[in-house]
Image (cartoon, rainbow, N blue to C red):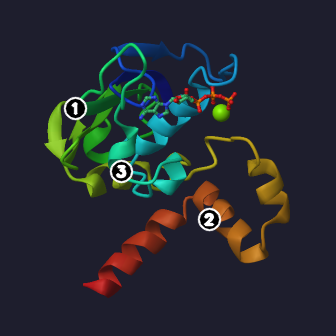
């Protein structure tokens, strides 16, 4: 499974609808300071269900909405789509038949946040469930950003184990067990 494209609108500095295509298995994003490199990564984490504003470098969840510049007025809504190529059927079960999976998250100034899976409204949990055990997800190792390598090197054994369990595909069973025990 591979991320094919990100479509952003009203998200942080991406006020106008913008599509960022990813045509290869590895992509580097380069550019001058403040051009929106980290905002692109924030967008990916946000759609995959990141629920901490701090992890998205803001104070409140609505801080992801474009809040105006010297030339432009603030907008009322942020929307981001992630388009995944699933032609290798990484996602099994009910998603096995889809060559392309698109997930969208939207938020409005009043704090209403909605998720969509291939155009149909869904819960946050439906999105996070899809990525459990695939190595993708809001805090996954699929996104390696500044400082992460040193955090991994300095991680305590029990922190490191979380990454190993995700790579080995164990984490989704642990999550299911936790859900069952909490019922
Ligand atoms: P660096 O190389 O310094 O890490 P970068 O390319 O990662 O830079 P970003 O952090 O992605 O840059 O983008 C920063 C820009 O995004 C700033 O100009 C900031 O004003 C703008 N920005 C962030 N949030 C919003 C928002 N909600 N509305 C409008 N602009 C925003
Ligand atoms: Mg940055």
Q: Residues within 10 Å of mark 3 (few under 14, many from 20)?
A: many
Label 1 CB less than 8 angstroms from ligand 1: no
In the picture, measured across the screen, residue 136 lies left or right of residue 109, that is right
**On the picture, is 106 further left or further right than 174?**
left
Q: Quadrant of residue 79?
A: top left
Q: Secondary structure at mark 2?
A: helix
> Which residue is painted at 44% across and 58% down in the image?
52
Q: Earlier in the sequence, mark 1 or mark 3?
A: 3
N-terminal of the pair, mark 2 or mark 1, is 1
Q: Nearer the viewer, residue 79 or 182?
A: 79
Secondary-structure class at tag 3:
helix
In this rendered view, identify the residue nearer to me: 40 or 69.
69
Distance from disc 2 to disc 1, alpha carbons, whole Å, reads 40 Å
Residue at point 15% right, 41% down?
121
**Residue 117 visible at all:** yes
Q: Is residue 114 left or right of residue 46?
A: left
In this view, 171 is above or below 147: below
Left or right, residue 72 beside residue 1: left
Check residue 165 in the rendering and tell me which mark sits there, or answer none.
Answer: 2
**Above or below 19: residue 75:** below
The answer to whether marks 3 and 2 mark residues whose Cβ atoms lie closer than 8 Å is no
Q: Pick whichever of labels 3 and 2 is earlier in the sequence.
A: 3
Q: Residue beneath label 3, please?
A: 61
Separation of marks 3 and 2 at Cα, in angstroms = 29 Å
| Residue 76 tag number | 1
Q: Position of residue 77 (x, y in %)?
A: 24, 32
* Residue 123 higher or lower than 177, as above or below: above
Instruction: For residue 97, say whether it is visible.
Output: no
Dot 2 crowding, Cα within 10 Å, few <14, some 14–19, many 20+ = some
Q: Position of residue 80 (x, y in %)?
A: 34, 30
Q: Residue 133: x, y in percent?
A: 50, 55
């Amino acid at each position: 499974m591979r991320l094919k494209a990100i479509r952003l609108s009203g998200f942080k500095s991406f006020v106008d609808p913008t599509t960022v295509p990813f045509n290869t298995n590895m992509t580097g994003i380069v550019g001058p300071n403040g051009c929106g490199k980290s905002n692109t990564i924030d967008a990916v984490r946000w759609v995959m269900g990141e629920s901490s504003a701090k992890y998205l470098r803001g104070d409140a969840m609505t801080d992801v909405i474009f809040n105006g510049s010297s030339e432009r007025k603030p907008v009322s809504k942020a929307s981001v789509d992630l388009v995944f190529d699933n032609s290798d059927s990484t996602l099994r079960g009910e998603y096995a038949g889809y060559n392309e999976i698109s997930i969208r998250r939207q938020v409005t100034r009043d704090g209403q946040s909605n998720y969509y899976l291939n155009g149909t409204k869904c819960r946050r949990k439906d999105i996070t469930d899809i990525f459990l055990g695939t190595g993708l997800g809001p805090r996954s190792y699929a996104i390696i950003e500044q400082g992460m390598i040193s955090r991994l090197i300095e991680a305590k054994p029990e922190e490191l184990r979380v990454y190993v369990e995700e790579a080995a595909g164990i984490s989704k069973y642990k999550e299911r067990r936790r859900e069952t025990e909490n019922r």
